[in-house]
Image (cartoon, rainbow, N blue to C red):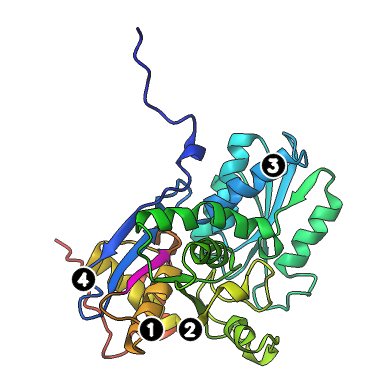
Amino acid sequence: MKKSINAHDSVLSLIGDTPLVKLSNITASMKGNYFAKIEAFNPGHSSKDRIALYIIEQAEKKGILKPGDTIIETTSGNTGFSIAMVSILKGYECILAVSSKSSSDKIDMLKTMGAKVYVCPAHVKADDPRSYYEVAKRLHSEIKDSVYINQYFNELNIEAHYNTTGPEIWNQTNGQITHLVACSGTGGTISGTARFLKEQNPNIKVIGIDAYGSVIQKYHQTREFDSDEIYPYRIEGLGKNLIPTATDFDAIDAFIKVTDEDSAHTARELAKTEGLFVGYTSGAAMQGLKQLEEDGVFDTTSNIVVIFPDHGSRYMSKIYSNDWMEKQGFFDSSRHEVESIQYI
Ligand code: PMP
């Protein structure tokens, strides 16, 4: 009998089932046991592969998408990359409206994956015709046979994580998880994962990471939209200037805020201490863990799972560039790093 060849049909079957890795060094002085879910192990290097595949396959099942149709989305980069990747393999056109805050690396990657990209100004209101929301809506109305993923307002975003990320973490921890800490952008990751985990054990505490300059934490506390909270910040993919319906605020116990500066340094520290080369929001999530631990939220019996959403290679021209850090004023005298390149 001929032996079969052990290969995946395409990269699509590599989506999900990402590893959980114990954090030992960066947490050495912190109470509790810390585990990171490394979403960069998805083939598109972020958690967004999960929602791209899930939402597209749900649309196919409902007969809304046929080969040759166009998929449109607003994205800070990662969702766009994932949709472009899935579109190539499934034969769809992909159009992406992105924020001008996205790194040039991210925009070049989207083009490499065959997407048509519209770069829209970052600091305009969500209802401004130039905002990436409005541009995507307009393109959707103009292009026949197009589907708008609309990740901020799509319940399937939550469902994707309810069906995959939640069960994976429950199984990987053998049900021993006590705390989930995750960034909240659309809120899909934290909400879907939290819903699943709390169904298994309602005592699990779920804490979201928000940015200074975002309305999310205040909305969670008051259920009111406070535009005074909004001002520009640098982290991409975290926090928001609107309230996404893809966030289930009832599934989340609390939000804490982290600064651009601390998050950038903590991402760099993860590389140097754990050998983990992860993105800016992973630094934000780790920074959130440090603050929570200082606030006495964890004890020695806590099993804390933190989600690291994407890979560090997407931020070479930002947090991993000393020039960029210097320009932001993130290197003060206490934090200046010694140049470690030697020219022979
Ligand atoms: N980190 C990064 C880098 C992201 O792109 C996103 C998505 N905007 C998030 C975190 C937050 O994930 P979610 O949208 O599921 O809340």
Q: In this view, does 219 lie to the left or right of 318?
A: right
Q: Is residue 292 left or right of residue 131?
A: left
What's the distance in space between the residues labelled 4 and 1, CA to CA? 17 Å
The crowd level at tag 2 (other Cα within 10 Å; few <14, some 14-19, many 20+) is: some
Which SS class for mark 2?
Answer: strand
Is-magenta flag for residue 229?
no
Q: Give the range drawn in magenta.
A: 302-307
Residue under label 1: 292
Q: Do the residues labelled 3 and 4 touch (CB within 8 Å)?
A: no
Which SS class for mark 4?
Answer: loop
Q: Are marks 1 and 3 in contact (CB under 8 Å)?
A: no
Q: Which of 224 and 175 is in front in this view?
A: 175
Please provide percent x and percent y for residue 42: 44, 49
The crowd level at tag 4 (other Cα within 10 Å; few <14, some 14-19, many 20+) is: few
Q: Earlier in the sequence, mark 3 or mark 4?
A: 4
Which SS class for mark 3?
Answer: strand
